[in-house]
Amino acid sequence: MFIKRSVSKKVVAGALAICLAILPAGAAFAGIAPDLAGNWAKNQISKWMDQGLISGYPDGEFKPDNPVTRAELTVLINRAFGFTETKKANFNDISSSKWYYSSILQANAAGYIQGYEDGTFKPDQKINRQELAVIISKLLKLTAPAAAPEFKDITKSAAWSKGAIGAVSEQGIMKGSGDGNFRPLAYTTRAETVVILDRALSVLNADSDEYVIIYETPGIYGPLSGMSEVDSDVVVSVPGITLRNMNITGDLLLGEGIAEGDVRLQNVTVKGNTAIEGGGVNSIHLADSTLGSVRVNKEDGSVRVVAEGKTQIHNLQIQSAAAVESLTGAEISTLTLSPEIPADARILLTGSFKAVNILASRLNIELSGGTVEAVNLDKTAGSNKLSNSSNIKSMTMNAGIQISGKGNIGNAVVNASGITMENAPGKLTIGTDVPADVKVNIAGSDLTVAASSAAPTAAVLVGGGGGGAGGGDGGGSTVETPAPAVTPTPIATPAPTATPTPIATPAPTATPTPIATPAPTATPTPIATPAPTATPTPIATPIPTATVAPTAVNSPSPSPSSWPVVTPIVTPGSTVAPTPPIVNHGVVKGFIERADGKAVDTGILYLERDSDHMIYTAALTNGEFSIDLPDGPYKIYSLRSTTTQEIISLYYMFYIMNGKADREVHILIPEQQAGTIQYSDGTAFENGEIIVQRLDSGPLGWYSAEIQAGRFNFNLPDGHYNVEMLIYGETNNQLRINYLFEVIDGKSNLDIKLPPKIEGNISFVDGSPIDDGWLEIREMNAQNYGIYRVPVVAGKFDLYLPDGDYNIQLLNIKNSESIALRTQITIVNGEPAAGPIDIKVPLAISGKIYNEDGTPHANGVLMITEAGTDSPLSYAATVTNGNFDFYLPDGEYDVLFYWDAEHQKRIDINRKFKVEEGLLVDPLDIILAKE
């Protein structure tokens, strides 16, 4: 059973365990360190390392006998107990340039640790066992025993520590050595710290029959290889978390704190129940995972759940608006739309399902692509609307329903009146539970079919585990009736919101330029503010022209950006600017200083409101600023010094709620990290820009820096990062790379050397050249992001890929057209294993789409799909003045629909065509009838 808000002891326990990983100890998730062999604390340390709760050093060792300092311990305690308030400390041996500076100020405000009489804190001093005993005793609020602790050397301990030593020894948290001594003045090692905190967790939860691990810091948890056994319930309370290679014996809660963010399970087995109460369009990804019972219930908004790889879900209960995608290879045995789903909610189901049970009423349901073995509509589930573009083998309808779309229904079992169907089923089965001469409306025509008096067949929930009324008494005798010979008339979609965006693009492409920056760039060049004021007017950043990109995708499902709102298609040359709502305002005051304690003199600060991407600027004077902002979530992403002209990339979040700021902004710019980037032959990378993402601060933690002669500088806080992209200064072409690094104590290793260059060629099969564009390449079985985007210039491209297996997926060329390639390559010792890379692209297949009077049908998008397969690839082409081009391998294809950009509506088209030896068998001319 899940507890949505765990008691404070449990929250502390989970946080205390997790935040030990923040110590500046080196690379995380290192597995079993070689220097743990034979160590007395190996089991506890190995368990914590397997779960990603503590890490080793960059050389792969754990160094269990290294001592822990006072500063390191304050960081652990502050994070564990949520101490965020700071209080000025007059310690004469700490400075704001140190990584632990804010932590000691927080410790001073909380009052759990003190300095020394000489005015020092001694942050780097090793902490001894009697000091740790006092701190643990305060953390757990332990009471000192009446009797003094029975240790031979207790007289060596200070009077202020004896009660605490007795308390922690009585609880078994800290023990003496084999000779009967406590060793109060001995330094506490890394191994001892893990064991003592592990025991403290047990005591903390001794009064509860549940033990909960709470992940509340973004990052990757779980071993890189092998499996970690987690014998407890698990709660994920923030976005940006990946759990991998875990067997969870208890329950799993993906909580409300995930909000609109994303969480990923990679090779995770949950033996208990799974509840999904957070997530948004970025989705909950379940990859190669096994889950028994899953409940989706997000209080506000919709959540997208994607099952991929070899994921298996036995029973999926939907209790709120949701989008569920079951991709090739995944298996969802039973999906139930529960009665708790609010009326008029939108449910989008994409891919293949064994059984879908509909128990809720007044839903807008969309079945998109793939195959559904059986759909059962309960007799209590009335007034539903189903848009079907999938293949339903059998559907039992115990209530009235409106079914639109050109999808197939093999056998339709009718046990109720009030059923309308746009597309005729393969066959009808009419039960005796309906009145005589029941009417079924198919393609706009009422069809009367007499009920049979044969032996009744019960209509029950399919797939099992519905959790509600199954309509078991709604049976009736059945007789198979051939499908009516009615020519379906296309039904116009009443509103664009009833259909998904016609193209599933990986990311909205702003302009026909090769690649859109994956996150709002920190470079503030788009805004020119020659004389910023203290209360600036918001600057609306125009949303780029939404050029429709023809895209080849693995399934006809819409992209995350098309759920839950249909993305409008904007005609070329037009722009859409966000209209800020009328909301309250609040004044934010802040101060920015450098790591050496000096204030940033003068300059401009750049902010973005996440809700509508409005850009704001504020003037800095001696490091201080004040700005009036409307309600909403904000991100400070950059500042420009008007004195030095340097641009510093930042990442700082805050909120304005009900006209009040949630904090006074105090930003400490970390120490500067210098880096270099060069090619494998030692030559420096050209001038340009480098973009990195922080992996442990959520999905939007992006930073950028200028590259000059192969050198660059960042000001990054401690954490784990990945170099995402390099941008060439002269051409603005983008080179996507993956380079993991970390910042510890303000230091990092940012000397990047690219893999050897591999030259490739790409042309059409007849030898004609390819226009400039870019390739999208995915690393197969990648542990991280593994996506590379490579510029193509005059049919040539250069790859800088580490050894591994790759799939060249797409070629994007003029007018943002995308061509599916599906070319696999293997790199061994810096060279392609199969020899030079020479890709041949199919020739363009041209067609026309026009009205009955012969006039071209303006602009839009035409969508087609492969025929004769359960998991077809879909292709889209931009229609310009009635003309369009596809680049298709030989095969048979179905035209799905045309999206009329001018009138913002979808027009279904029933048309087949065939490609042989790169040519159309028959002309692909499409005539649209008048409405």
Image (cartoon, grey):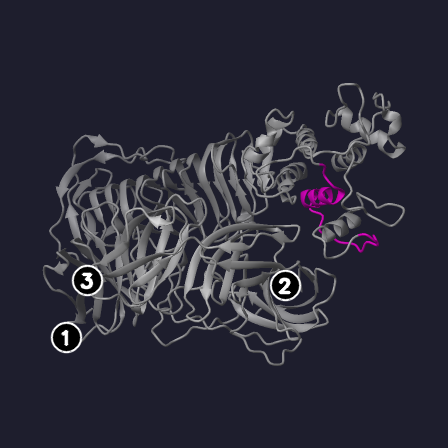
Of the two numbered discs 1 and 2 in the rendering, the one whose residue sits closer to the viewer: 1
Going from N to C along the chain, the mark reached first, 1 or 2, is 2
Alpha carbons under labels 1 and 3: distance apart: 27 Å
Residue that mark 1 sits on: 854
Of the two numbered discs 3 and 2 in the rendering, the one whose residue sits closer to the viewer: 3
- Residue 914 vs 195, above or below: the answer is below
| Secondary structure category for the residue under label 1 | loop
Q: Is residue 227 magenta?
A: no
Closer to the camera in the image, 385 or 627: 627
Query: Is residue 162 visible in the rendered structure shown here?
Result: yes
| Secondary structure category for the residue under label 3 | loop
Magenta stretch bounds: 67-93
Going from N to C along the chain, the mark reached first, 1 or 3, is 3
- The residue located at (16%, 54%) in the rendering is 890
For residue 350, side relative to residue 24 (left or right): left
Alpha carbons under labels 3 and 2: distance apart: 58 Å
Q: Tell me where residue 895 appears, x and y as whole percent.
A: 20, 58
Q: Quadrant of the C terminus?
A: bottom left
Q: Residues within 10 Å of mark 3 (few under 14, many from 20)?
A: many
Residue that mark 3 sits on: 843
Q: Please name the amino acid that badge 2 sits on.
A: Asn
Q: Quadrant of the N terminus?
A: top right
Q: Tell me where residue 832 appears, x and y as whole percent.
A: 32, 49
The mark found on residue 658 in the picture is 2
For residue 490, side relative to residue 207 (left or right): left
Alpha carbons under labels 1 and 2: distance apart: 57 Å
Going from N to C along the chain, the mark reached first, 3 or 2, is 2
